[in-house]
Image (cartoon, coloured by chain):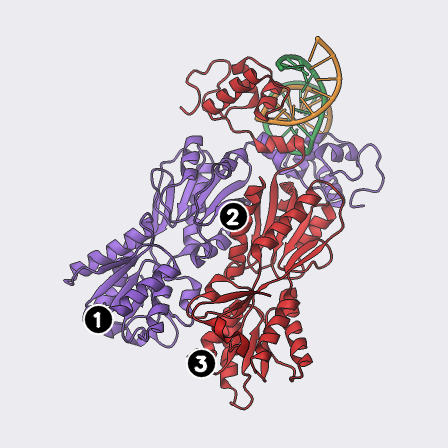
Chain colours: A red, B purple, C green, D orange
Amino acid sequence: MEMAGRSSGDGETGERWTVASLARRAGVAASTVSRALRDDPRISPEVRARIAALASEVGYTPNVLARSLVGGRSGLIGLVIGPVENPLYAALLQKAVSRAALRGWRLLLVHAGAGPIEQATADSLLQYRVDGCLITSAQLPSRVATICRANGVPLVMVNRVAWEHGSAVSCDNRAGGALLADLLVRAGHRRLAVVRGGPATSTSLERTEAFAAHVVAAGLPAPLVLGGANSHAMGYATGEAVAAMGAGERPDGVMCASDLLAMGVVDALRERGLRVPDDISVVGMDGTEPALRAPYYLTTVAQPLDDMLERAFDLLQDRMRGVPRADELVLLRGELILGRSARLPADLAGDAFPGQSRMDA
Amino acid sequence: MEMAGRSSGDGETGERWTVASLARRAGVAASTVSRALRDDPRISPEVRARIAALASEVGYTPNVLARSLVGGRSGLIGLVIGPVENPLYAALLQKAVSRAALRGWRLLLVHAGAGPIEQATADSLLQYRVDGCLITSAQLPSRVATICRANGVPLVMVNRVAWEHGSAVSCDNRAGGALLADLLVRAGHRRLAVVRGGPATSTSLERTEAFAAHVVAAGLPAPLVLGGANSHAMGYATGEAVAAMGAGERPDGVMCASDLLAMGVVDALRERGLRVPDDISVVGMDGTEPALRAPYYLTTVAQPLDDMLERAFDLLQDRMRGVPRADELVLLRGELILGRSARLPADLAGDAFPGQSRMDA
DNA sequence: TTGAAAGCGCTACCAA
DNA sequence: TTGGTAGCGCTTTCAA
């Protein structure tokens, strides 16, 4: 009943309409229908209008699978996303979907989560002939990257540095780490600590290394190194450990490799009766939404996710057009967000209350 | 260089291998290759082994698009997911991906987020000939549902009741609401309030209605009705309002339609100096991970997400096989989680500390 | 400006 | 057990 009522030579009842059935119905050739539907200028306005009307009347939808078969492009982008319990990846996912749609691409969800990618799953990239692949995950090695490279599938990674091959768009983690170090140092902190994320994640390494380097360069002792996995639980455990330290050795400022870690640290410190930032300053990095609101109001460096994705899709598009291009690494500057989780330098103290205020990093 | 070295009659250099090129190379017919690769029992073991070896040697990957064209099924499931900043949807997404992979399905990400689905996006369901569709979102009306129905695409909704058509798998929200009401009433709360989510979401309505009904049935005054959107911000605003009430009129127990709301309420109450649960009990619903940990340790009803998805995929699979089946509504019981955000009835008081304890709902 | 025919990569059918 | 052929729905030559 969605189809045309009568099932004469053309509208095969119950079946979906095709270019051929439309052509028969309209009394033209299939090629004409095909061209008309894609607004080929060589088709006369009348015919085009007639076919367009017919198509919309019967609710025709082109079969992209068939189109891809001949055209060679599927319109699909493979998406590998990190653990979405991390709000950062949740945000990336959401933005990626809408941005992809703007370019007429659809996302094939290849993997989500922290676990390794199974072979069968990775194979689907090839089986579905994805035009490109977007990897959003901090883990360094990846089977998907290997497959893409071996098969000429354009690949862009977001929030991670390309490991062996593929292009990448990332926040300038070193700049961010240095920025936070500068902030804490200028605010008068003297005993600092860093809480690291996963040992194999470029983001964590870059952020904490740059922080430490900047602290040392400022003449302070090297920060205490804690953590080692990117999770709230790890942050919490670290916070407990810090709270258990004697007042003489306890750091007065803690830089975390991610907001997730920072939230865990803050939770543990507060549960142990320590006040943030009065007793100890905590800063994070990522700028995820839950970290910016109550009860954290975290001082952090926000990743410019929209810009990152836009650039990532640009890189992908260039390579999908077939133009051979070398791999690129694009670094975008993060934005310092002055929350209420860290003591501020005197010259900034006015900015921090009551909400967050932002300044370019 | 991924291809075979010499480009004789078969291995077209740089191009991907096809059934035809494999056949030429192996000196057999294309149909033989096709059958051999799919382990058709009619192919002799030797030939099959030879072809399998060749295929794996050259790194052949079947083109699913072409296969779908003839076979009629794409192996794709369209996925519409709610706002993933809500950890509930993030968890659902992650579980859906891995569970789909177990059945050999891939997820085509059609939409993510709270916004409405654009027409072009919804059309992709038809264009890519998805075999079925999974909607995970609390919003009641949906363009996608209409499209699926009009085109015979099997549709299952998770965490929401089917609006006009389609099957659905949901947590038994009424039972959950009643369970929480019972818990609070038995613990001696006398002035209760409910914080509702979006006005058009079945989950919110069912949960709060059942809660209220149960409270009234217990002989207490009808709960105060607050809220009206499912977000942390709304929870926070509601918590502020509650905190501002005079001690005489302020509720002593608040039931929230979601964990997200409950977290907001708790954050606001605490920021205003009220203690949870000493001054006021707060319970949520969903059982999302952030709500279960510090600083919330929420008392809530956890949705059995794994079971829900499994059932949803079962429903989908039945309908994808072509067997005509009526729409079904599957309700699964949630699990009461005794956290630390609500005062407990005397008979349960021992269970609640120090971690969470669980009991079947 | 339109039509006829070939073919994308694969599977299914009918013979051999 | 294997091969040839047709055809899925579409686009794209090449002719008319």
Q: Which residue is mark 1?
A: B246
Is label 1 in contact with label 3 (beta carbons under 8 Å)? no
User: Left of B286 or right of it: where is A144?
Assistant: right
Q: Is residue B167 left or right of residue A343?
A: left
On screen, residue A50 above or below B97: above
Q: CA distance from mark 1 to mark 2?
A: 52 Å
Callouts 3 and 2 close, C-beta under 8 Å: no
Residue that carries the numbered disc 3 in the rendered image: A275
Q: Residues within 10 Å of mark 2 (few under 14, many from 20)?
A: some
Chain ID of residue with mark 1: B
Of pointers 1 and 2, the one earlier in the residue sequence: 2
Q: Residue at x 63, y 36 (%)?
A: B40
Can residue B248 be seen at all in this image of the molecule?
Answer: yes
Can you tell which quarter of the image residue C4 is in? Answer: top right
Name which residue type carries label 1. Gly
Q: Chain of mark 3?
A: A
Q: Quadrant of residue B353?
A: bottom left
Residue A82 position by quadrant: bottom right
Q: Which residue is mark 2?
A: B100
How many numbered marks does the figure carry? 3
- Left or right? Give the position of A260 relative to B253: right
Task: Give the residue type at disc 2.
Answer: Ala
* CA distance separating discs 3 and 2: 45 Å
Type of amino acid at the residue the image marks with label 3: Arg
> Percent from the top left, x then y, of residue A266?
47, 75
Same chain for mark 3 and mark 2? The answer is no
Q: Secondary structure at mark 1?
A: loop
State the quadrant of the N terminus of chain A.
Answer: top left
Under circle 2, the secondary element is helix
**Residue A200 appears in the figure:** no
